[in-house]
Image (cartoon, coloured by chain):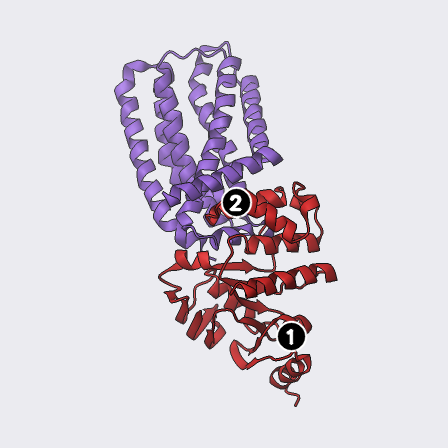
Chain colours: A red, B purple
Amino acid sequence: MIDIKGLTKQADNKLILRGIDLSIKQGETVAILGPNGAGKSTLLKVLSTLIKPTTGQVMINGLNLKKNQLEIKKLFGYLPHSSLLYDQYSPLENLIFFGKLYGVNNPEKRATELVKEVGLSFFLNEPVKNFSRGMIQRIAIARAIVHEPKILYLDEPHTGLDQGAIAILNNVIVSMKEKGTTTLMVTHDFKQAAEICDRILIMKNGKIVDDFKLKERNLDLVNDKYQLQVEGVS
Amino acid sequence: MTLIRNALILAKKDLYSELKTKQVLATMIIFAGLVILVFSFAFDPANNTTKEVIPGVVWVIIVFSGILGLNRSFISEQRNDTMQGLMIAPMDATSIFLGKLLANFAMILVVECISVPFLFLLFNFKILGSVPLFILVLFIGSFGFISIGTFLAALAANSKSSEMLLPLLLFPITSPILIGVVQATRITLTNMDKVKSALAWIQLVSAYDVIFFVLCFLLIEYVLEV
């Protein structure tokens, strides 16, 4: 699904990504862990076409990222730190707008379904500016999946969420996984990573330093590997 | 077709947003009203020479209230990083440019529809020339100014002092348009004997509009790149 070869990204003489080689199969749920400044978010931004790589090749679903941007943009949903929502618009208006941009059939129906799915049907027509952080994040999740993407890029999606919102987000990710969606999630929340991901990547200084499969939600394994690679504790 | 469809969706979003917040259009109209009021105090409407300043006043209103709208056009997309939402959507950067251009153009047309009759009324100005030609001049002049302005607003939006940067970039580049339309407006409003001269100015402005519209269209992708 995602094939990355020799990916580098340089900004202001600083090498942020230093030769990433990565292959992710369809349906995998992958967590990217690493300290601040490791290049995790930059990797997601490159994959989501927001920034151009300096060198290297990225193929997504057999399409070249440089040459087939429009087709690739239809394939993924991206949830960054910001909500990407219009404050003055209601959840319904936001989702209909993005649904139309993605060419969703009957965006009104899809938007209503999604708002219900994230548990905010009582706030269908309230402007987003009146919402709490958790409520905004729920609508942001709905926005990211409005076009039923094949790939989901999530950048620290659990940050600032209460337990209810975390459960809703995890349900969305798991139900998307059941439909065959590939998920790539940058996170600092090891517990959530162990809970929903079946593969863990650890990044440090712009490189992938560890890549392992996770079985039976083994949080201890994640902690041990992270400490070994990042903090040098064995 | 997809390009135009997406541009229309974006323009509709901007205009609907404006309808809800009434931030930009209200500011533009208030500004236009203030300009007219100040000029009506500065120049005696009963004096015939006052009529000479009317074409200039029309374009002062369009240029300065236009800048108020242009400044907000891309800065409004910085809140919650909504610009990123547009950039990752399956549409070309040209659709974003075209959508913003259409919304800005619609807003300036609304300002013109309100302020120009008000100006003529307050100055008791009777058009001696051709009204359709005057409307054509307003249309092509506003289009050129707004298309270049939308492009430069996108360019300036990432700067910390974008509100200062936009006029600095905009005035030198649009000065041929402004010279042309002020001259053409003067002739079409007051002296139809020189209609050939007005048509020459209109042709010049139209050519400038086309060249810069195409240039903006080709370059917007590089400007919007994060």
Q: Is residue B50 above or below residue B167?
A: above
Q: Quadrant of residue B207?
A: top left
Residue farthest bottom in this picture: A234
The residue lying furthest to the top in this view is B46
- Circle 1 sits in a helix, a strand or a loop, which is it? helix
The residues bearing labels 2 and 1 have C-alpha atoms spaced at a distance of 34 Å
Which of the chains bears the disc numbered 1? A
Give the image location of residue A174, x and y in percent: 60, 65
| Residue type (three-letter) at the residue carrying disc 1 | Ala
Give the residue displayed 57% in from the left and 18% down from the top: B41
Which mark is drawn over residue A107? Answer: 2
Between residue B187 and residue B82, name the one nearer to us.
Answer: B82
Residue sitting at 31 percent across and 38 percent down? B210
Q: Is residue B14 left or right of residue B198?
A: right
Residue A42, x across and y down, in percent: 52, 67
Q: Residue at x 69, y 44 (%)?
A: A123
Query: Which chain is home to disc 2?
Result: A
Say which residue label 1 marks. Answer: A194
Where residue A179 sits in the image (x, y, percent)?
A: 53, 63
Q: Report whether mark 2 lies on the same chain as mark 1.
A: yes
Q: Is residue B44 visible?
A: no
Element at label 2: helix
Residue plotted at (59% across, 27% down): B30
Counting from the top left corner in percent of width and height, residue A55 is at: 40, 71
Residue A221: give its label: none
The residue closer to the viewer here, B77 or B122, is: B77
Q: Residues within 10 Å of mark 1 (few under 14, many from 20)?
A: many
Amino acid at the residue labelled 2: Pro
